[in-house]
Amino acid sequence: MKLHLTINGKARTLEIAPNALLLDVLRAAGCKSVKKGCGEGSCGACAVLINGRPRNSCLVFAAQCEGADILTVEGMGTPEHPHPLQEAFIKHGATQCGYCNPGSLIAAKALLDRNPSPTVEDVKEALDGNLCRCTGYVKRIEAVLDAASLGKK
Amino acid sequence: MLKNLTHVHRPSTIEEACALLAAPDCKNIALAGGTYLAESSDTTIQGLVDLSGLDLNFIRETSEGYAIGAMTPVQDIFKSKLLKGATGHLLKAAAGRIGSTLLRHSITAGGNLVSVFPWSDLPPALLALDAEVQIRKGIPKRTVPVATLLEKTPREFLDKSELVTEIHVPAYGATTGTSFTKFAKTANDYSLITVAIRITVLQGLIRDVRIALSGCTKKPVRRPEAEALLKGQTPTPERLANAAARAAQNLDLTNDFRASKEYRSEILPVLIRRGIEDALRQIAA
C-alpha cells in the first residue's frame, strides 16, 4: 500500500506493507538515527515526533501515519548546525555510547516545544520513557535545562 | 507481527468503521493507539480499522461531568486543564501512571479500557467513578456502565460491529475525595497492586464509597462488601482498617515472577486503608 507523509519537512510517498512498523519504514527511508532497542516500547531509542507528539515508533504501524508530519533527529540539526539541544548534550557530556541519544533528544524537543521553561521534575517526566545505560540521567537533565535557558537568550 | 494482515482501513465515519468491523468474510479489528497490536502475532487478523479519522479525540464538559473521546491519548487526560475536582484528580492520577511519556502519547483512553490488561491503570479509576461508556453500532448507540463492560472482558461483551466511542465520567462535589495508588517495582513497570478510591462524606457520615482494585487480579474488580461496611458510618480508624481487610479477602490474587500472591495479600489491605485515608484527606483539602 502507498503511504503519504512528511519526513523531516520533505513530502514522501512510500510503498509499505500493511503490517510494517513506522520504525522499520523510517530506517529504510534513510533515517538511521531511529534505533531499534527493545522493540516493545520500554527503551525509547526509537522515539520520533508524530504530528508533534513523541511516540515509540516501534509500536506504531506505518499505516497509521498517512498524512502525518514526522520528525527524527536528522530533521533537528546537522553536524555543521546542531540544534541547541544537541549542542547542550555535547557540552554536558550527556552522551556515551550514543544509542539512546536520538530518542532522548526527540523527547526533550517535544518537552521544550510545549514548555520552554521546564523544571527538573518536568525534564525527568518528559524523559521517563528513554532509558540510558551508560552515562545515567543527571547529565542529560542538565543538558536539557541548559538548552532551555539558551533558548530564552 | 501481524503476519496475515492485508488491509489497513481508514474510515472517516463511525458508521463506516462499524460496517468494516462487521465484515463477515474478513477478520477486521479496531486500531486505536496500536501499542498492543503492533506487538501482536495474532495470525487471524486480516484487516485493521484505524479509528484516528473519527474525531474521537476530545475531552468535554457535559451537564453531568465529562465526556472523553475513546481516541484521546491518555497523556491528554494526564495534562488536562479541563478535568477538575475529585473526578479530575483520580483520572489524572491514573492516566499519569500509565507507562512512560512516550507510551502515554500513543495509548488511548478507549484502548486502555477495551483491551483491559491486568495492569491497565485507567479501568479501576473508571470503576471507582461509576463511569459509563457510549457504544455505537453504526447509528444505533447504547450507554453501559464500565462495571458492566468489565464483568467479562470488553471484547466478549461487545458485539463484533460495536465500538466504544466515548467514556462518560460524572463530576463529584467538594464533599467527595478520591485516591489512586499504583504499587510497582519501578515508576513505569506494570502494577503489582492498583487501588482506586472514591468516598463522599456528609455531616461526618460516609454517604458513598467505591473501592476498585487491579494489578493483583486478572481483571479490575470492585469490592461492594467492604464498601457496605463503610456506608452510613463515621470513618473511624478501626472501621477503615476492617473495611480494607474485608476488601482484600476472597480474591484470586496473581502469583507471578514480579510478586507472590502471599506478598500481595500482605500489602493489599495496607494500600487500601491508606487509599481510603488519602481520599478522606482530599475532601478536607
Image (spheres, coloured by chain):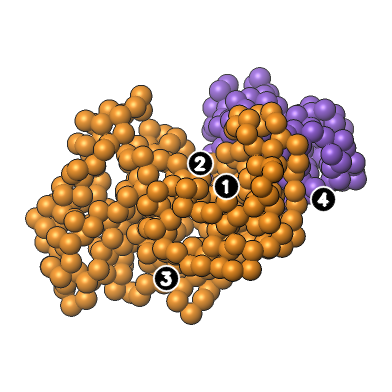
Chain colours: A purple, B orange
Q: Quadrant of the N terminus of chain B?
A: top right
Camera-side residue of A91 and B15: B15
Look at the numbered discs 2 and 1 and tell me whether their residues touch, using CB distance below 8 Å.
Answer: yes
What is the distance, in whole Å, between disc 3 and disc 2 at their CAs?
25 Å
Q: Residues within 10 Å of mark 2 (few under 14, many from 20)?
A: many
Circles 2 and 1 on the same chain: yes
Q: Earlier in the sequence, mark 3 or mark 1?
A: 1
Amino acid, disc 4? Gly
Q: Residue furthest bottom?
A: B63
Residue denoted by label 1:
B107
Q: Is residue B89 positioned above or below B119 on the image?
A: below
Circles 3 and 4 on the same chain: no
Which mark lies nearer to you, 2 or 4? 4
What is the distance, in whole Å, between disc 3 and disc 4 at their CAs?
36 Å
Which mark lies nearer to you, 3 or 2? 3
Which mark lies nearer to you, 2 or 1? 1
Picture quadrant where residue B125 is located: bottom left
Circles 3 and 1 on the same chain: yes
Q: Which mark is residue B170?
A: 3
What is the distance, in whole Å, between disc 3 and disc 1 at their CAs?
22 Å
Residue denoted by label 4:
A67
Q: Quadrant of the C terminus of chain B?
A: bottom left
Q: Chain of mark 4?
A: A
Look at the numbered discs 2 and 4 and tell me whether their residues touch, using CB distance below 8 Å.
Answer: no
Report the residue at 50% width, 48% height from top: B155
Residue denoted by label 2:
B99
